[in-house]
Image (tube, rainbow, N blue to C red):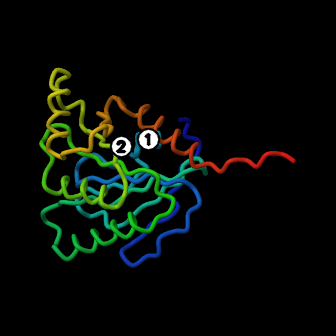
Amino acid sequence: MIIKTVELETVCGITSKLPDNTKPEFAFAGKSNVGKSSLINALMNRKAYARTSSQPGKTQTINFYNINQALYYVDLPGYGYAKVSLEAKAKWGKMIERYLQKSPMLKLVFLLVDIRHEPGSNDKIMYKWILDHGYEPVIIATKLDKIKRSQVQKQLKVLRQGLQVVPGTKIIPFSAQTKQGREEIWDLIDELTRMAEPEEAPEE
């Protein structure tokens, strides 16, 4: 995918109305510090465009990035940060749920999980939540460069078993350092974007 233009088009807070987008949306979910901003920046081919915070758990908005005037990357708030109040967590949960329920243009949810560790309870809840809303997420196993190559298959098995993934679920190992996995993610997005394009009416 050649990235020509990137624009942070809409920022939705807890009380904001979701935008009436007419282009395909690809959402990114994951707990705080899993590397979501690094992934989105890599997919935008920008070093530091996606909003990041030095304090995990501070992102409280849904950010819509218009890519090439053709599709949207949708950055969902990070979850599972211990120091955030229960009230704030509940509000973020409702905001994410509202988006999953109500966006007609959402084509795919990418769920980011750290390849080094067994999925936590929040990861498992989020995975089930996405399934319950009718989506089969693609799992992005982040921080690939932090483990040895010989450990990769073992850790992918840990993720599969920990999340109890639906058979056939795609898991893509990704490294923000080497960009391994980026082309595969782009190819998926390209394919689904093409499938979402309206067919041209045959000429009379």
Q: Amino acid at mark 1?
A: Leu
Which residue position holds label 1? 43
Q: Quadrant of residue 38?
A: top left
Q: Is residue 45 above or below residue 34?
A: above
Q: Quick one: which residue is furthest to the top in this view?
A: 150
Q: In front: 47, or 132?
A: 132
Task: Tell me how far mark 1 sits from mark 2, CA to CA.
Answer: 6 Å
Q: Position of residue 64 (x, y in %)?
A: 47, 59
Residue 61: which numbered mark, if any? none
**In this orientation, which residue lies closer to the viewer: 48 or 191?**
191
Horizontal relation, residue 192 to residue 100: left or right: right
> Pointer 2: what residue?
39
Instruction: Classify mark 2: residues with Cα within 10 Å, few (<14), some (14-19) or many (20+).
Output: many
In the rendered image, the vertical position of residue 199 relative to residue 1, given as above or below? below
**Element on which disc 1 rests:** helix
Give the residue displayed 26% in from the left and 64% down from the top: 58
Q: Nearer the viewer, residue 197 or 48?
A: 197
Q: Where does the image place residue 167, in percent across and percent down from the top left? A: 27, 39
Is label 1 in contact with label 2 (beta carbons under 8 Å)? yes
> Compared with residue 18, is residue 53 higher up or lower down, i.e. above or below?
above
Where's residue 142, x and y in %? 26, 39
In the image, taking residue 126 as reference, residue 8 lies left or right, namely right
Q: Residues within 10 Å of mark 1 (few under 14, many from 20)?
A: many
Where residue 116 appears, as percent x and y from the top left, is: 15, 37
Q: Quadrant of residue 114?
A: top left
Specify the amino acid type for callout 2: Leu
Which SS class for mark 2?
A: helix
